[in-house]
Image (tube, rainbow, N blue to C red):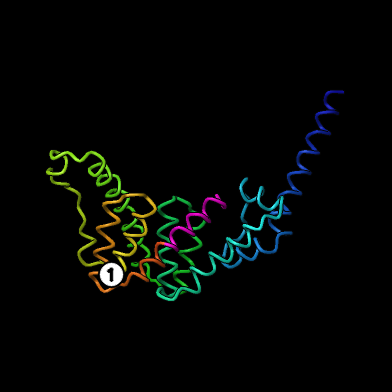
Amino acid sequence: MEAVCFSFETASFFKKWNNMSATATIQNETFQNLLNELNIAGYEPSTNVQALVAVESRFIKDLKINVGNVLNNSQYLDRKEALLLALAVAVNEKYTLLQDAFTGLAKSAGASDAEIAEIIACTSLMNTNNVFYRFRHFMQKDFYNNQPAGIKMSIMANPVLGKEFFELVSLVVSSINGCEMCVSSHEKSVLQHGSSESRVFEGVKLGAIIKGLITVLS
């Protein structure tokens, strides 16, 4: 009797799960279109996606519009630059699904293997610097501030991405990681290398939206 009851409950559970999965991946056209635009196949809906789809949340449409705008309709970033910035965010957030997707899309937009590799290197370096300089800023002690950092940063000298764009990537990653000192330094540097405040604004907005996308998908 217990075995029959268990079998019935198990079957009901899997039926419910399959229905939820089908709803998330097929019945919500807006969400499916978002996945298609990002070139993501075989996505297994996260708990967050299932919750939004279950109530047909209006945020799904907002998210699709926001992501589409920053990747395709930027006035101050070209398509390749937007995708490389999005890739940096995915690397920073350790979300391999989007990292793979943005790598493919960036290459389709003309990014080289060297540029892809440098996005990864830049993001790694910023994670190092963001922790180190945030600590210095928090402590405000002469001893820590006067010690040589001793962190090798040779890739910043002559980046494949170009100095201006390398600084923009550094600024976006630092903004996500919340290092005030790094944000101020890279914002100043990117402007000195010929960028504009409008370009900075669009870059940071892209970073914020892609981080929000990852919150939903992961």
* Residue stretch rendered in magenta on the structure: 205-218
Residue for point 25% across, 45% down: 132
Q: Picture coordinates of residue 94 (x, y %)?
A: 44, 50
Number of labels in the image equals 1
79 or 56, which lies in front? Answer: 56
Residue 207 among magenta residues = yes
Residue for point 26% across, 51% down: 181
Q: Picture coordinates of residue 120 (x, y %)?
A: 36, 58
Residue 122 location, quadrant: bottom left
Residue 192 among magenta residues = no
Q: Which residue is mark 1?
A: 164
Instruction: Report whether 148 appears left or right of 166.
Output: left
178 or 28, which lies in front? Answer: 178
Instruction: Report whether 59 appears left or right of 120.
Output: right
Which amino acid is tagged 1?
Glu
Instruction: Report whether 146 appears left or right of 180.
Output: left
Magenta stretch, main secondary structure class: helix
Q: Picture coordinates of residue 170 (x, y %)?
A: 31, 59
Counting other residues with Cα less than 10 Å from the Cα at mark 1, is it few (<14), some (14-19), or many (20 or more)? Answer: some
Q: Picture coordinates of residue 72 (x, y %)?
A: 50, 73
The quarter of the picture where the N terminus appears is top right
Residue for point 44% across, 51% down: 93
